[in-house]
Amino acid sequence: MIHPDTVLQFISPEIGYGVFATRPIPQGTITWAHDPLDQILTPDQVRGMPEIYEEPLARYTYRTPEGDHILLWDLARFMNHSCSPNCMATHYGFEVAVRDIPQGGELTVDYATLYMTPEESFDCYCRAAECRWKISADDAEKLADEWAGRIQTGLLRIGEVDQPLLHLLRDGCLQRACGDHGVPYQLPLRRLF
Amino acid sequence: MIHPDTELRFVSPEIGHGVFATRRIPKGTITWGLCHLDHVLSPARRLELPPCYAGVISAFAYLTAQGDAVLCWDIGRYVNHSCSPSSLSLNDELDIAVRDILPGEQLTDDYGMLNLPHVLQCRCGAPGCRREVRADDHLRMGAEWEVQVREAFALASRVPQPVLPYLKNASQLLDMLEGRADVPSPLAYCVPPAAGVGPAPA
């Protein structure tokens, strides 16, 4: 589920829609968490669909290393890619804001963090100063350290900000994410809801 | 799956978003049909969900006569109600355009056909607005809906049906289009809440 202080906005015919903050969302906020309405489509389920589904599946789902297609049920599926994203996906089913997102700012994520396959490479026009131009599955290996550092900057603030999505996290996910990134995890979080 | 010639537009803070035609959609076109990606949530499944989803399901899902809540996966979930709608339910898996829908015009349904678990106060502004939309509206409106749906369906085999290949149950529509099955009466898929469509969401 996407953070509640967000709205879908049309950007342009080329880009389509994007997800924008309706209030400031500070660094350290969990901006998205996997939830029970997100659909996990197994390879068998996908094979059972008519060929015409290839286009919507390619556009709106991401693939896990196990080969399942994940179709997010809400606005989260409209989050666009940026080479300098303000949200980073962790391995524990949630994303965290890695810098302050102002009201009206677009929430973005680096698609290369979403288990891309070699066929899913694409040309990027995100206009970020650090734009890689070509986004590909190899990025994950090259950028692992940089991504880990960004996730850490988010996790360091996790106990200092409102967390409306915290209740969706599975037990132990936050502790493990903090452990992976060398961030001390202290309970109770200062402001849970 | 919603008709491909549609887009989501913001209407107003009170109404939120709505679905608008980007090209002319002729009368008789299936404007929405249940597809493989829609969520069909049984009453048991809804009880397992955390309470925060009650509002989502109440705002965006509709109920079938069997009590399942259908949450469209795509912008189909943003189709608003009108008392003079552009589409009506053909059954609980299909909507059909009951008049030509022009480019830029909003696609609307009659929520009175969707087994509402609560009374909806309506300010749609359409001539003949019922002010209140209720699950038992079919007792008063059923005959009129049936006439409109049958008249629209008579054109269905003569207009493009781009939603057809996405349908979860395409054979059901093909059977109707090719005359092997009759168009159902709205009474077959509208049941009043007393008949047990499940508890009203919070």
Image: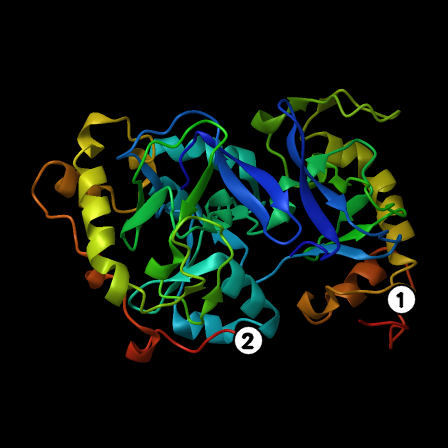
Residue B100 lies, with reference to residue B82, above or below; the image says above
Q: Which residue type does callout 2 highlight?
A: Ala
- The residue pinned by badge 1 equals A159
Residue at the spot 40% in from the left edge and 66% down from the top edge: B116
Q: Report the disc number at residue B202.
A: 2
Question: Which sits in the foreground, A132 or B70?
Answer: B70
* Residue B196, horizontal then vertical, whole percent: 32, 78
Residue at the spot 25% in from the left edge and 67% down from the top edge: B139
Circles 2, 1 touching at the beta carbon (< 8 Å): no
Mark 1 residue crowding within 10 angstroms, few (<14) / some (14–19) / many (20+)? some
Mark 2 residue crowding within 10 angstroms, few (<14) / some (14–19) / many (20+)? few
Residue B172 lies, with reference to residue B68, above or below; the image says above
Scheme of colours in the image: rainbow
Q: Which residue type does callout 1 highlight?
A: Gly
Q: Secondary structure at mark 1?
A: loop
Residue at the spot 23% in from the left edge and 59% down from the top edge: B142
